[in-house]
Amino acid sequence: EDAGGTAAGTLKADGFGDCLPSAVNGIYKIDSALGSNNFIEVQLNLTAAGNYVIVSDTVNGFSFKGSGNIASTGLYNVRLYGTGKPLNSGVNYFTISFGNSQCDIAVTVVTAATNIAVFTLGGSPGSCTGATINGTYTRGIALTSSNTVTLNVNVTALGIYTLAAASVNSMFFTGNGTFTTLGPQAVILTGAGTPNSSGTINVTAINPSSNCTFSIDVLPGSGSSGAVFTLGGAPGNCTGAVLSGIYQQG
């Protein structure tokens, strides 16, 4: 259910003013119009629910914007889609603004001659085949570099690539690099963000030509309403203990 009014909060940033956590997805190429695969992810600490609009300045012929409605306070990942057409190659520094809060993010534009990889995701359009989930995921605990997902892809054209998993439960996963060989291989996506609920979370990895879904089990965390119990007989001998099986030396 949508919340009425205007949202309030701050963009998360590190001590240098850089958006943190953050991710850049898509290939940014001279004279190529940006599409739905060109977006950035930033994290918002919402102190009042409602409608939000987050924008960047315009740099080198393109910019980013995201809007929507968030029904409750807390940490949320938000996606800003790019529009425009990059004019020159190099690193571009954008200022992201939400109300009076700002943070910075860098986006690299490649030359027109750069080769862009073409690949499909294993298992598309269903479950990602052979997906490997690494690290521990706990509600309220920020992801680190140990939280990764390995996906299988089939490369049909060499070049640079980026791959992202759709933001869900305040987590997102991104990876980038260069494919130098054709055929089946693995891609590692690194997670960021802070899960805001526990349970089995379905996440969709997307690229321009295919997508697939993998699942992550998020633990409740210490602040959840988990079971509370004491051991019978504590702190002495366990009362009513029952031993099963035969225990034989050696």
Image: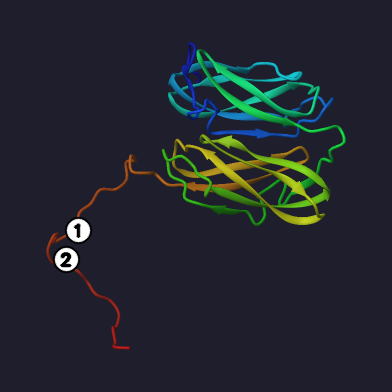
Query: Is the C terminus in the top left, top right, bottom left or bottom right quadrant?
Result: bottom left
Residue ID for mark 2 = 238
User: Circles 1 and 2: CB distance less than 8 Å?
Assistant: yes
For residue 140, the mark is none
Q: Residue at x 44, y 42 (%)?
A: 198
User: Residue 227 in the image: x percent, y percent?
Assistant: 29, 48
Q: What amino acid does circle 2 point to?
A: Cys
Relative depth, front residue between 201 and 46: 46
Q: What amino acid does circle 1 point to?
A: Leu
Q: Quadrant of residue 66?
A: top right
Crowding around mark 1 (Cα neighbors within 10 Å: few <14, some 14 to 19, many 20+) is few
Relative depth, front residue between 124 and 189: 189
Decide which of tag 1 and tag 2 comes sooner along the chain. Answer: 1
Residue ID for mark 1 = 231
Instruction: Give the SS element for disc 1.
Output: loop
Q: Quadrant of residue 197?
A: top left
Above or below, 61 against 129 in this view is above
Alpha carbons under labels 1 and 2: distance apart: 7 Å
User: Residue 178 in the image: x percent, y percent?
Assistant: 75, 47
Residue projecting furthest to the right: 113
Crowding around mark 2 (Cα neighbors within 10 Å: few <14, some 14 to 19, many 20+) is few
Position of residue 79 in the picture relative to residue 100 (left or right): right
